[in-house]
Amino acid sequence: MSRRDLRLGSIFSSEARNSLRQLALSAIEGAVLTAAAALALWWKLEAGLFRPALVGLAAAFGVSTLSVALLVFARLHKVPFGGFMKAFGAGVALRAAVLAALMAAGYGTPWKTQGALLASYTLGVLFLLLLEYRQLVRNTG
């Protein structure tokens, strides 16, 4: 049996299925939280500000889901604690990169639009970080 076959076999192990199940549950929880925040924004914001706020929330959800996936992947491959923290650091760097991209995308738009875009992203990331924190606690005990 080749090394490639062994790696593919480990993808379909029960531990891998459990990790993927945890990732799916985290994504569903994040989607519910994001939908609740979008509903609150729809209710509270002016009509022209809802779309940029929704873009910010969607970006926060995407980054959070990808960051949790990095943590689940690191745990699945049983990396040492330092490697797991590198996966966490990669998630933080990803958040910063998306924030910079949103800032660049909002450049030149009215202040209210920029505020809705960046505030919804920032608050979305903060709330969704709780899901990632739970993954950290699971790995570090």
Image (tube, rainbow, N blue to C red):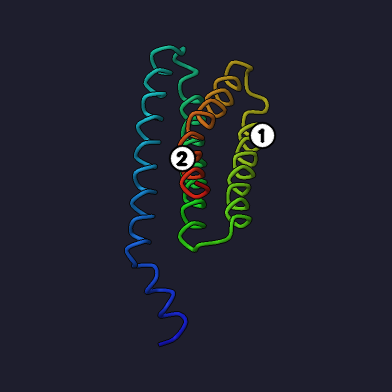
Dot 1 falls on a residue whose secondary structure is helix
Instruction: Bin the neighbour count of mark 2 within 10 Å (Cα to Cα): few under 14, some 14-19, many 20 and up.
Output: few
Q: Toward the viewer: 107 or 4? A: 4
Q: Which quadrant would residue 33 be assigned to in this image?
A: top left
Query: CA gap, disc 1 to disc 2?
Result: 31 Å
* Residue 101, quarter of picture: top right
Q: Which residue is mark 2?
A: 134
Picture coordinates of residue 109, whole percent (x, y): 63, 23
Could you say which disc has been placed on residue 104 in the image? Answer: 1
Q: Quadrant of the N terminus?
A: bottom left
Few, some or many residues within 10 Å of mark 1 (<14, 14–19, 20+)? few
Q: Position of residue 97 (x, y in %)?
A: 64, 42
Label 2 element class: helix
The residue at the point 50 percent across, 62 percent down is: 78
Closer to us: mark 1 or mark 2? 2
Numbered mark located on residue 132 in the image: none
| Residue nearest the viewer, comparing 100 with 10 | 10
Looking at numbered disc 1 in the image, what kind of residue is underneath it? Ala
At 59% from the left and 55% from the top, the residue drawn is 81
> Does 66 sit above or below residue 78?
above
Q: Position of 110 compared to 124: left or right?
A: right
The total of numbered circles placed on residues is: 2
Measured from the top left, where is residue 120 in percent x and y? 52, 25
At label 2, the amino acid type is: Arg
From the viewer's side, name the closer residue of 19 and 116: 19
Query: Residue extending furthest bottom?
Result: 1
- Left or right of residue 55: residue 89: right
The residue at the point 51 percent across, 35 percent down is 129
The x and y percentages for residue 25 are: 34, 44
Residue at the image point whose x is 34% and y is 40% from the top? 28
For marks 1 and 2 on the same chain, the one whose residue lies earlier in the sequence: 1
The one nearer the camera, 125 or 12, is 12
